[in-house]
Image: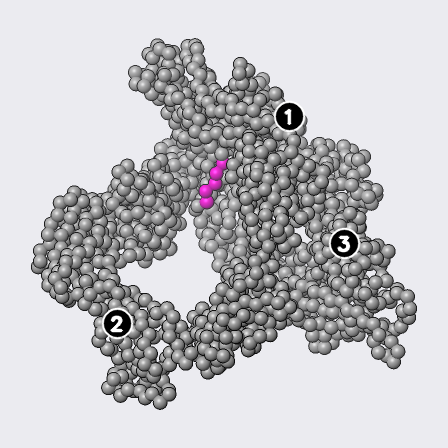
Amino acid sequence: VSVSPSRAVNLGGTSVLLKIQNLASSVTDMSQIRVDFGDRQMTVSNLKRVDGDILYAYLTVVTPAASDLLGDISASVSYSAGGNTISLPFVLNLFQPCNLKAFCTTSLPGSIVAVHVVKQSPPGSGDCLPEYQAKYCILPSSFAAPKVDFFSPTKGLVADGTPVTATISSFPALELTTDNLFLTSQAVRVYVTVGSLVSECTVTSLAFTGSNFLTQKATIGFNMITDPTILSGTYPVTFEATYGIYPGGSVTLSASSSFQFIRKVTGRIVADPATVPLSCIASECGGSSVWVRLTNFPYYSMQAPFSPSKIVVLFGGSVFNATQILTSTSTDTQVYFTMPQVVYSGYAGTFATFSLAYYDFAASASICQQRVATLCFDRAATVSITVQADPDPTLSEIFPSQVKKQSSDANRLLSLTVSYLPKAVSVSDLEARVVPRGTTCSPGGGTLLDFAGTPLVSTNPVDLVPACTRRTCSKVAVYVLAPTVSPSGDQLSVCLCHPAMGKCVSGDLTMSDYLVSVDPPSVSVALGTTSLVEVDIAGYIYVAGGGVSCPSVADCTASAGVTGCNCQRFHVDCSPVTLCAPQPTITSFQNKSVFVITLALSPPQQLGVIPMSFVDQATSTSIPFSVTFIQPTPTVVPIDFPALGSGLVTVTAFWGLILQSAGVRLTYPDNSFVTVSSSSLSVQSEYTQIQFTPSYSTVGTAKIKLNATSGKDGSQLTTSISLDIFSTPTVTAVEPSQAGVDGKVGSCTQCLKNVDDHTISVWVSGFPYIDSGSLAAVKVLYVGSGWQLECNGIAASDGRSCMVRSVDTFESQDGSPLLYVTVTVPAAKDSTAGSVSLQVEYVSSDATRSARIATTSFSYVQMPPVFLSAAVCSSCRASGPCIAGGECGDGRQPVYLTDASPTIRAPSVGGATLVAQLANFPSLVIDSTTKLPVVPTTCVASDFCGFSLEPPSAGTVTRVWASSIKSTRIEVSLSASTLLSTAASIRLKTKPGGDMQTANFIISYYKSQLTLSASPTQGPAEGGTTITLQATNFLPLSPSTRLDDVMTITFGGQTAVGASFAPGSGASVSTGSYGIVFTTPAFTCAGCIFTGGVADVQVLLTAVSDSSMSTAASFRYIQAPQVASARFNQAGTGITITFDQATDRAGTTTSLFDCGLVLQTTANLLGRGPSCTWGSSSVLLVNFGTDTSLVPGNTLSLASRPGVRSRIGPSSAAATTPFTVLAPLSASRPAPITLKGPAQIDVCSDLQLVVSVPSPRALTYTWDCPSDANFQALLRSSGFGSALYIPKTTLVQSQYATWLDLTYTFTVYATDFLGLQSDLATIQVYRKSSPAPQISFFGQPSYSSQDNILLRGEASFSSCAGITPSQLSFQWSSTAPSSTVRAVDFAKLGVATSQAQLYIPKGSLSPANTYRISLDVSMQGSGGTASMRSSKSMSFFVRQSALVARIAGGAFARISTASPLSISASGSYDPDQMSGDNTTIAFSWSCSISYDGFYSQDCTDSGGNSLSLGTSSVLSLGANTLAAVSAPYDFTVTVSKPGRAPVTASISVYVTALVIPFITITQEVSDFNADGYPIYGPDDRIILVGFSD
């Protein structure tokens, strides 16, 4: 353990960071750690882990007040792991600061001590220095005035105790009347002043933000006073805290706000206005938004601020919520609600009336639905909306309005757009006719037209195709075919009539020999370019045929060689132009037939609208259109330019005219201007282009004005464009500005994001605004001599990489953008210290912008070498690293020290090995044979290169196992010494004459002959065990010595007293070898930690006169068993009680026994006749009796006699303290529900549905009939159980009697005592008006692919009078009604389908599919014909089975290091695949070892290298691969397959150095349960096969 800081003021309250290396992985909570500090304890405030090469933990502790202590104070961190108590000593220096109270009082009268500054930066001297006044003394007048920044809610009911949150700035966080206490919620006063009465509020929370304790923001939570007598109104609320002043007096700081109290209203709610000024057409009222103002309406105290869920609306028996609350005050509430989508035709010409109310007793509006009359709407307001009748239909459009005669069907399609067509109308209700224009339309008149396509298609985006869902639709398209010849002239009317309604709508249609565009197109063309123009002309253009020949090829140069060339004449600027194109085609565009011609147009000599026309040569018909020529905006490249930068700016102005002359003026931001030299101008016939270099130092926008003179008419033309001038980008700050050569950086207080030890923050000015998160817009590079590294996350050839982590833009003080970038820091090139260039580049997505690059320097420094860890082994392993698998060569676990400069303990006789891991040594090449660095050949003995130890007499560096800047692992052989301690260092020089780098440490030597043994070695945690310690070569004494005066004995930090010499010690006392007898102290303190019921502690014997004379033994405390957990099992049939350790099973010897031997059963919660059995020595299984009443949350207690004790060793009986029974971790929902009932019933039958759900406890059932409100009301009011029975006498009642020849849907689900619900079971019953047999069969909603499926059908005869029973025949069938449902191929499966039950063997159906089957039952009539027939269908889903992972040979194995290891998972399989076909199954192996007090995630071989395990189904390791260690190697195989959940299986392999056979056990069995255990029947043979090598 290392300490930072190492000094603290003895006033207490200083936070100290303890960095612990190799803290046991089992220590995960602060409560497991005890930190002793002298005779006191430190408070542990935080525990954080960081994974790296070595496992680190960071523990934050707070020093206690210790005004009586000064100087170096011994402290220790203690915890238990793996049965051992580990204690890590450290030292903290305490000092007494000057008497600041007296100092501030005399040097600055009236001031108080700045305790927060003392805590952050305590005085470093006992003398009160003059500069302390400015630092530690504060005048109350310097306090900032507190201010309420946030207060919400600001109003509430007088009797509601409204919870309020307020934020106050400049509200000090320290209670300055004492030295150590922060301001608490009890010290803050919040009160309301009503007249002369002051009422206190209850403060519930207090939190602070900000680094300065005197100006922090305080967030205060409190409950407003509850006083029903307060009148409605606004009253002041005051926040107050009092701070002490030395030597007396106080200062009070306060801030105020206000709160509006509202009295709860009574009486009826009033809607204003009662009739809303809103009218709607009956078919379109649904979805309309209604605004209403409500008075005498409650204002809620912001538990649900402005939430419309509190306001409910009633209309037509349905309840729904308001959609929005605009405002809510004590006088009125303004509300919006949406009219529901229902039919309003019955309200046409009248009002639709809504009731509005509120509820404050229920969680949802559904409660109001059930209690409309009595609870929710007794005070409701009513609001009326005027409903208008739907208007008569109209024909709003016919398209096209012109049709060419003799057209084909596809080209005479007419679209008739009809408004307000009744929803119920279909094409069969309509007729379309044509009559001469001016003739009145009537049904049956004129010439009948044919309908075409889908006749009713909505043209409104909110309508549905083919018809809208509202009663009428605003626009519906009806398609008809126009006549091929005009029946009565070319001017016609198209009539759409509804004969039954006697109504018609009409529109005009023109028939013609050719078509003329009604709306000639107008096209805009960019001036100065040759563009393609699309001209859309409605209808047909007659361009060929009729004896018209194509012009000569000379006139069709654009399409020479094209067969069937057709030419059209165009007129541009009064000059004819001929365009040739292939045969034109008709294209469809928005249900219109259009002829699309593409034109290539050159610009004219003037701007504006140019008339053109299209000439049909066949008919000499001219179709005019026009093209508008406009002048485009000039372009500038780039669009921005650096101030006083270099390079060219190119400006192009397009004129499109022949020019006489042109000029350019550039106006800078300060209104100065320059005229660009004519030599820079390039004047063309259509545009002007200029290239120049702006020379200007001020940032801003420059204006570029261009002018030209037309060569045609001498007119003056002008245009302009802007150019942004920006300052040169600059890196304004980099934090931190340097890193170690490993890329690690120090802390950063200015950084805003991604604050860690590998990321820096960079601020850049002079960049354009970049959206936050736009990582692609910024490129960052580190540039060194001959290399550069772009931060894109891609590793360079040397393995180094970096990446941009965030990009944000802020506004600087002058309003310009300030870019903020965080980027990771790569390791230095070749681990070399020095300066590199950090380059930030703007990457524009627009190529017209100038490049922007900001550059600064960044430094890499060589950090001094430090220890990451240090440990000492008395003996090393014979080969490989000294420490492997967490053990030294003698099998003992080393104790790691993690100080940067540690003090290690070593035997004075030498022979031990120091294993050190260090950081910040440069990377070196290590010789694979010598395990020492490869050094330059120029190194000689006088100028030694490589690692060495100083002083040389302390030892020798023997091996280097790893060498990198992050971690260098070295082994040092320590020499014998006669000194008590010596300062030493590990040194490295990499080249002759180079600098020497050193890592310092201290060696403390101890006498290795001290020994200690204990007998007995274990006892109860409560203490009281008489123990004898046998000391050898310890402190020489006389027989009359009082042992408590000369030595201390501690057990895991607990001191034992009353020691005496053991009988028979005699003369050996004077030689330092004797026995010591005493009674063990209790090990029950708050920091006394047990693991698995035991605490292996160190017995430490220390001489009072010389603390370095110390020796240790071990002792095990055994705790009474404790209930670790008690939970219901997954099925709910019992509970599992788990103890924290193996028990003596309360002395029971039978497998089943009376639970009263272990549990107190007086409450009879376990039912009548419960039984218990031990699943293992630590797990008690309780099986419930009948009538069990136990539910999660109930408590049970252990019996006091005979009592449950530890099996590990002597312990007390387990306590009878009640423990809580918890719900199962993964409770099973009720089993698949089976719903049996008839598929149909006739008018003479009762309705009976039966539910079957296997369950150990009673279930409740919820029935519903969503398809019928009458049945639904009956089911909800009757409370049916597992059987639903409705007699025919009920079914003939008036509300059910007329509902015949319809299908009803019934649903049911079951709920168990844990509140878990089963799947919903559904059945459809057809109620037939004529007699018919009834069918029912049992089936489940889903089956596993490995389940046998058995469906049983039943049928019964109709009970109608006159029905004679006869033979019934059954027939099963299967069809696929849709692409998502499959059919069962009964013939392929060989399944019998003509019996009452259907059996489908497991594995017959494909998993992950839904199947549908049907049962048809007929009653045979005379002659063998079916007189009555009924059928029923059901669907079920076939689930995929879980993958199966199997490791052959058992769960454990023990092998010799000399034996090879082979582990096979070949028995793993996918049950859904054919046997032996596992080609898609993938295997992956992992291995881990768990040690007491140390955890290594990966297994290593005997040489300390990581194991290569492969991805085969068989894992093979050669002989001598694994080392013999005390813990097992846990090998785990993961079996996976795409789209399936992976599964695992494990085997623990113990490795010993003994030569022993390797054995396995296999079983010949095919069925396994979910936990992987084989399943046998009571009559099965059990065959076990043993194998030995």
Task: Indicate which label's residue lies in the foreground, 1 or 3.
Answer: 3
Between residues 510 and 942, which one lies in front from this camera angle?
510
Residue drawn where x is 53% and y is 14% of the image: 196
Label 2 SS = strand
Frontmost of labels 1 and 2 is 2
- Quickly name the residue at label 2: 601
Left or right for 364, reference 1501: right
Residue 48 among magenta residues: yes
Spot occupied by residue 1167 in the image (x, y as percentages of width and height): 81, 42
What residue would you read off at disc 3? 1271
Task: Estimate the x, y position of residue 499 in percent, counting from the top left.
Answer: 62, 70
Frontmost of labels 2 and 3 is 2
Residue drawn at point x = 14 percent, y = 60 percent: 715
Near mark 3 (Cα within 10 A), the count class, few <14, some 14-19 or many ≥20, is some
Marks 1 and 3, the one that precedes in the sequence:
1
* Horizontal side, residue 267 vs residue 70: left or right: right
Q: Amino acid at mark 1?
A: Thr
Quadrant containing the C terminus in the rendered view? bottom right
